[in-house]
Structure formats: C-alpha cells, structure tokens
Amino acid sequence: MGATGGPHGISPRKSPSDTCEVARHYPAPSAGARANRLQNRANPQENGQNRPGSVVARSAGMGCAANLPPICAQSKGLSVKIRSITALPVNIPFHAPYRFSYGAIASLTKTVIRLVTEDGVVGLGECADGDRAADVIAAGARLVGMDLRDIHAAEAKLVPGMRYTPWGNVLAARRVFGGIEMAMWDARGKTEGVPLFQLLGGAVRTEIPLTEYFSYRWPGANHPGESTPLEVARYCAAMIERHGSVIFEGKVGAVALDEEVQMVREVRAAIGDRPLQLDANGGWTVPTARDALRRLAPYNISWFEEPVETYEEMADLRHHCDIPFSAHAIDLPKAVALRCPDCIVTNVNEHGGVARTRDFIRACEAMGVGFRFHSGETGIASAAYLHLTAALEHVRGASQTLFHWYADDVIEGGPFALEGGITRVPDGPGLGVTLDEKALGRCHDRYLAEGAFPDGRSGGYGSAFRKR
C-alpha cells in the first residue's frame, strides 16, 4: 500500500503458538474444494456465476459491439450533448445486518443516476452517501445541452469551490457532482466504445485485489449472522473454502475489548498466515486503542484502519506500535506533516468524481502516502473504483469490498464476483456494467419501505456511536 508498504508488503509472522478452539474446526480446504473453486473461476456460467467481473459476463454481452451495436460500433458522428439526467434512491440490503462502532446497519442507501445523451447513449453514475436524488435532478438540469466531455466546465457550474471549506453545501455539491461526473465518463466510454480504464490511460492491472470482510452480524431474514468469536471465525474459514479468500479485514470497536481480542484470536487460527486487517472506525479512545494494540500484537495485524478518530491521535499511537494505519478523513497535507496515517481510504464521491479522485491518488503518490478504496456502493460505483485501480499503479494492495455481504444489486448479474481474492475489472465500454431495471425497482421499493439509512425506519445506526 503506497510508499509505506501495505498488506502485500508485510510478511506475516507465524500464527500464535497457543491453540484456539476454532483451529480444530478448520482443516485446510480439500483438494476437491480447491478444484471446484478453480472450475468456478474458469467456467462461471456452468456454476450460475454469469456476473460482472466473470469471464462469461465479459464475453457474453459486455463487449462493445455485442452490447451496443448502434452506438459503440458506429461512434463517429454521435452527439456528446447531454439530453437529461435523472436519479432514483435505492436501498441495497445485506444478508445480515453488520455491527461496528456506530451500531448496526442492514441496508445501504445510494442514489442511482442515469444520464442520457441526445443520441440515446445512457451513462450510469452513483451518489454513495444516501438519498441525493432531488439535488442530482436539480443540478443535472443545469447541464442539459453541455458536452459530456467537458468535465471542468460542468464542475464549475455546480461546485462553488473544490477546496475543503467550512460550508457544508460545498461538500454536498461536490458529492452530487461526483455522481453526475461518473455518469459522464460512462457515457463517454460508451460513445467512444472503450472502457473507462482506457480513457484514463490504459490498465496497469486487470485483476484487482480486494479484502474479505468479517464482523459480528445480527441475524438476517435468511442468514443466521455471527454472534460469537467462534462463529465469526467459522465464517472466515467458510470464505476460504468457498471463494479462496486471501486478505481478511474485520470490524472491531462494536463490543467489549476482551471479546474482540478473542474474536481476532479465533479468526487468526482459522485463516492461518493470511493477511489480517482490522477497522475500528475511530471508535476507541487513545488509552483503549493503546491497550488493544498491545493485546492484539501476537496476532500479526498487517493493517489497522482508524483505531482512533483523528490523525493526531493516530500519530500518538504510532509511538507505541509499528502497524500501518489508514483513515477515511481526507487531509493529505496533515498526513504528510504528521507522517500518519500511512494510507487514505475513500470513495469516488468524496473527491467529486473520477477525475478528482485520479488527481488525488497522483498527489498521494507524489507525497509518499498510500491510497485505496473503501466499499459500500452499488455495482455502478464499485465498477468506477475497479477502473481507477486498474489504471493507476499507486493503488496497491487490497481495497475494501462487501460483495459477499450484499443480498442484491442494481446491475445485471448482481454483485461482482470475488474469487481467490481478486475481481476482474469490467472490459465493456464505459464502466462496463448494465442497469438491471427489475433490480432497480426492487431496491427503490425497499428504500420506500425502509427509509434512508443510516436512520432507517427499522433501525439503523443513527446516533448510536459511542467511544469505548
């Protein structure tokens, strides 16, 4: 991860010598299971896996000429003027509500954006931070008639200023524009018949490493969840058996520290020497974090995200451990000055779109700070960060994903496939994904029934955050 190293650059120490109960439950994956997993990756259609990121999905409809013959194959002379921009809020459900330092969450509320050019090319975008449909529609009306390639002029029309300011409306405008700008890139790629990573300069990688997430989870409608350290560890072992998971990242800060240390101990026994990362979402005070890091040291934690809330607190902790830290808060000058955190973890919306995210990643590279993406988007925004990861060499190591937790998605084929710790970047035009209209309707109906998360009518995390 970045100039300071990361999950792939840290040699795991041996597992703790003390034997955990969970270790007795996890024999190494059988040869048959490994063979089946390899067959799944090689022949996804035979195993019901015709999903984005799979070989079949790419060869059976995501290619330019096959998917959009009147548009991609005859792109010369097509209009690049924006005709309309519409938006719809959706809730993407989890198989089971996951618990973290803010409480628990059962669905993610996102805004799906559809941009249509004068020649009928459809570009998809997403606002990843809740229901922003009304704002997107109002902003989009101001861009009608503009050239979808003119990113800077569109940004100047909608965003008062891209610097970080005390005014919240600037941040909101940046996030709204970020979703629209994503759709502009998608439409441009479809118009020109090339994938987004090609528009960004070409791919330095096509197989994108991603983490396998774990946490305590409440029972879901069709899932038992995990409520004990042993159950969490069994889940991790199952992910190795089913999907060949490579790098694990888990939520802490949700329950008492004694229990979470036991959970990490059991998970380490279940996954062997595979990289193990943790994320407290800033839920610990400095004294608690110092104690936690000391007690977790035997389990070879390769990366820790937000053990405490601020950069300054992380810099304080740096005196007590050598585990690399990452954070969601965006302050590159401060990260350079404090030499902490080692990596900044954000999404495309936070920066105001694909172009601004690309620029920020290049700035991180120049300043010696790592970068990776966090997860929690539909397949639309997930595709955007896969393309950026493919195009930018500095996004090293494994970004985060919740693909195996999703119970639905708005793109054809459902959530992206994650096998052997990697997802292939879509190679169709633009983002390389297609909206599933029936799934979009389901997820919008779910939004109408549940309300927007985090404060959903059936219980979100809302104001449940308490430092431990």
Image (tube, rainbow, N blue to C red):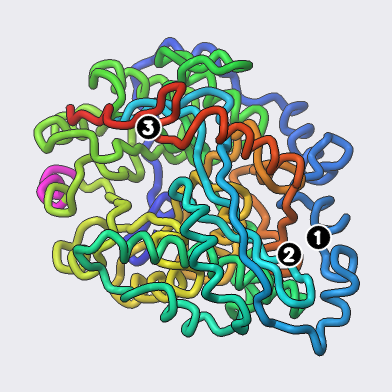
Q: On the rendered structure, is 397 left or right of 28? A: left
Instruction: Give the residue pinned by disc 3.
Output: 251
User: Crowding near pointer 1: few (<14 within 10 Å), some, many (20+)?
Assistant: many
Mark 2 and mark 1 residues within 8 Å of each other at the beta carbon: yes
Q: Amino acid at mark 2?
A: Asp
Instruction: Give the residue pinned by disc 2.
Output: 427
Up-down: is 321 above or below 288?
A: below
* Magenta segment boundaries in residue numbering: 315-321
- Residue 239 lies in quadrant: top right
State whether residue 405 appears in this view: no
Give the alpha-carbon distance from disc 2 to disc 1, as whole Å. 7 Å
Residue 140 shown in magenta: no
Whichever of callouts 1 and 3 sits on the residue coming sooner in the sequence is: 1
Place of residue 209 in the rendered image (x, y in percent of width and height, measured from the top left): 56, 52
Which residue lies at the image location 52% right of the left edge and 18% below the top edge?
234
Marks 2, 1: nearer the viewer: 1
- Residue 267 lies in quadrant: top left
User: Crowding near pointer 3: few (<14 within 10 Å), some, many (20+)?
Assistant: many
Q: Amino acid at mark 1?
A: Met
Up-down: is 220 above or below 196?
A: above
Q: Amino acid at mark 3?
A: Lys
Up-down: is 387 above or below 399?
A: below
Instruction: Give the residue pinned by disc 1.
Output: 62
Up-down: is 236 above or below 228?
A: below
Which residue lies at the image location 31% right of the left edge and 43% below the top edge?
304
Mark 2 and mark 3 residues within 8 Å of each other at the beta carbon: no
Query: Mark 1: which secondary structure?
Result: loop
